[in-house]
Image: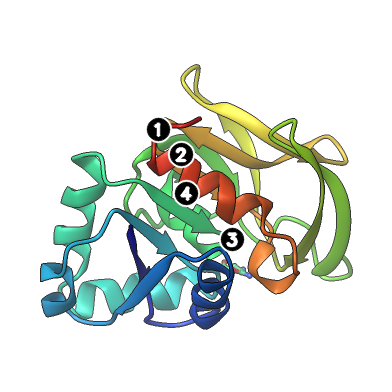
Amino acid sequence: MQIGVLALQGAFIEHEQMLAKIGVSSFEIRCKEDLNKPFDGLIIPGGESTVIGKLLFELELFEPIKKMIDDGMPVYGTCAGLLLLADSIKNDNRKYFCSMNIEAVRNAYGRQLGSFYAEESFADICKIPMTFIRAPYISRVGDDVKVLAKVNGKIVAARQGKQLVTAFHPELNDDLTVHNYFIKMINGEI
Ligand code: GLN
């Protein structure tokens, strides 16, 4: 098992450390050539979706990665990664991979609640720590999308086939539930 972690901007090192803790190896995707290495799943980290999006185009990574996702490459998008995978962003007309049948609201919690912490159930497994940083939430899901977590009535984690998104950053806490879930999802165990 090998995971490619998109390493253009944002919290990618923290994802690599989480994967290492559960014994899964990973490598950083920084340029087109990195896509020639074999991998079983892709993580798109949190950061700034506009910056990551711009760099994806500039480095000519956008088209090949979109094709991989559309062809079924398992993918996990955190926060900005969720925005990059969303079919639409309610308060922003930028479009990226649009591979997941969800609508997201960007910077959805306003200034005062820009960053906050919650503990809620994830995928009916257990309550997990959730760190939100200028996070989106999901305002609409398609029929084929499974809601995995809600905070204050807002959807903050979802899955569609082999695509997983969280509005929060599990890589900034010690809990490995979400990363374990992603690996099991890749393996077809869940
Ligand atoms: N607000 C950021 C964006 O719009 C996402 C924040 C994050 O990834 N922590 O891309």
| Residue at (71, 68) in percent of width and height | 134
In-image side of 105 versus 53 (left or right): right
Tell me the distance, in whole angstroms, between the alpha carbons under discs 1 and 2: 5 Å
Q: Earlier in the sequence, mark 1 or mark 3?
A: 3
Q: Residues within 10 Å of mark 4 (few under 14, many from 20)?
A: many
Tell me the residue that label 2 is attached to: 185
- For marks 4 and 3, give the CA distance: 19 Å
Residue at (77%, 65%) from the top-left corner?
131
- Secondary structure beneath dot 3 equals loop
4 and 2 marks in contact (CB < 8 Å) = yes
Which quadrant of the figure has residue 114?
bottom right
Distance CA(mark 1)–CA(mark 4)? 9 Å
What kind of residue is marked 3? Cys
Give amino acid for label 2. Answer: Met
Label 3 sits on residue:
79
Per the image, the residue denoted by label 4 is 183
Which residue reaches farthest front?
23
